[in-house]
Amino acid sequence: MRKCLLSLLLLIAFTLFFVQNTFANSKVHFEGGANNFVFYSDSDWADTDLFGGLKNTMPGDVRTENITIKNIADDYDYVKIYLRAEPTTEEIKDFLAHFTLNIYKDNELISSTSAAEQGSLETNVLLGTFANGDEVLLTTELLAPLTLENKYMYVSGEIQWVFTAEAYKDGKIIPPDTGTITNSNEYSTGTIVGVCLTATVLVIAYASYLFQSKKTD
Amino acid sequence: MRRKSQTRALAILGITLFLTMSGSVAYYVTSETAHNIVSTGGVSIKLYDQADPEGITPFNDLENISAGITYSKIPYVENISIEPVWVRAKLTLKKKTGDTETIIDDISTLMELGEIGSSWIKADDGFYYYNQSLALEQKTEPILRTVRLKEEASEENTTYTFTVLTEATQVAHNGTSAITASWTENGGE
């Protein structure tokens, strides 16, 4: 009986190990606060590399990588998360141009283009409106042609993805205004500051007006 | 007059309050960049010589071969890439007379090749194809064990060099054997 239990435990441990390794995922969590986006990468190359499964690609390969996008911030009513791709540099364009990159959001194709091009990710694509705990699954599929030449052996190229979050509270929806964001982890307070400044100017104007009205009376 | 200015003042206050409240709605935008890497693998092999008395060393060409002498030469291939590979080899004899160097197309006309490995299959293109794939760090059986230049090859001012050319190509999406695989580019060393 004890032997049987031990065997069962070993089997479960083996199965868990196998499952974990077969379905290795990258994760992007929106945590809000000071952390904002946190990447949980399955890549050995870099902590911010979400393409752990797209390494050592060989001609004819079709490689996939699953990336879970999840909102775990509880400071907001909801968060809108967008994704866009940055243009690739000229040096690696020649290499990446040989690959096709398909991106699925919960099994729905949202982008299909050469890996060297931004395609439909040239501008922000809304991945969804996330309440706390909501998530979507992005699946990236990389297709390498059988005709890939020897000169592309052991070559690598970077594809930059920019995740942008708009966090809302009190139900007020403000249109996307992500064009001014250039640095990671930078709060876009420009809109709020602008409104506050306008309000301050108006308060001063109002006070002056009252003062003048009193003087006139 | 007083009433009019009060109305105006209230209107301005209203606008001010509205705008101030709009600005106080909690809202921010943040972004983060992922630096995703796509990389390719490749195939790499090494050719060794088991005959070296010093141990297993990289294969060196057999130069200045004298006719009629049997030389021990035991070349074999190791896959040093993560990718499984198909392997093929070409046994070559270079003949140099003065400054002129020629490559003998059919080596067997001038050389006796001893103990060709049973896993090496000779094809019409002159290559020997290894009949199984090699995983990382797997080795082939030796291609052959001895070479001997035939007496009739002996000529004045002529030297011979025996060499082995090996190539590798990927197993994935590439045929069911080394012979049926595509060898469109030189994939090995």
Image (spheres, rainbow, N blue to C red):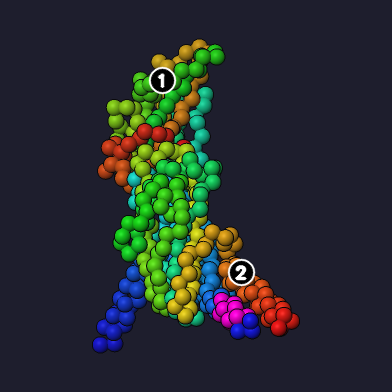
Q: Position of residue A170 (x, y in %)?
A: 47, 80
Residue furthest front as drawn? B1
Residue assigned mark 2 = A194
Asked whether B109 or B165 is in front, the reply is: B165
Kind of element beneath mark 2 = helix
Main secondary structure of the magenta stretch: helix
The boundaries of the magenta stretch are B4-15
Split into 4 quadrants, where in the image is the N terminus of chain B?
bottom right
Q: Chain of mark 1?
A: B
Say whether mark 2 and mark 1 are on the same chain: no
- Residue at 46 percent across and 46 percent down: it is A116
Find the distance from the CA under tag 1 to the CA under tag 2: 83 Å
As shown in the figure, which amino acid type bears the numbered disc 2? Gly
Residue furthest bottom as drawn? A1
- Against B73, residue A175 (above or below) is below
Residue assigned mark 1 = B104
- Against B136, residue B181 (above or below) is above
- Residue at 35 percent across and 74 percent down: it is A16
Q: Position of residue A206 (x, y in %)?
A: 66, 78
Mark 2 crowdedness (10 Å alpha carbons): few <14, some 14-19, many ≥20: few
Mark 1 crowdedness (10 Å alpha carbons): few <14, some 14-19, many ≥20: some
Question: Residue A145 sits in which quadrant?
Answer: top left
Residue A185 visible in rendering: no
Left or right of residue A192, residue B140 in this image:
left
- Residue at 50 percent across and 81 percent down: it is A75
Q: Chain of mark 2?
A: A
- Residue at 46 percent across and 30 percent down: it is B163
Foreground tag (1 vs 2) = 2
Asked whether A163 or B1 is in front, the reply is: B1
As shown in the figure, which amino acid type bears the numbered disc 1? Ile
Residue furthest right as drawn? A215
Asked whether A54 or B26 is in front, the reply is: B26
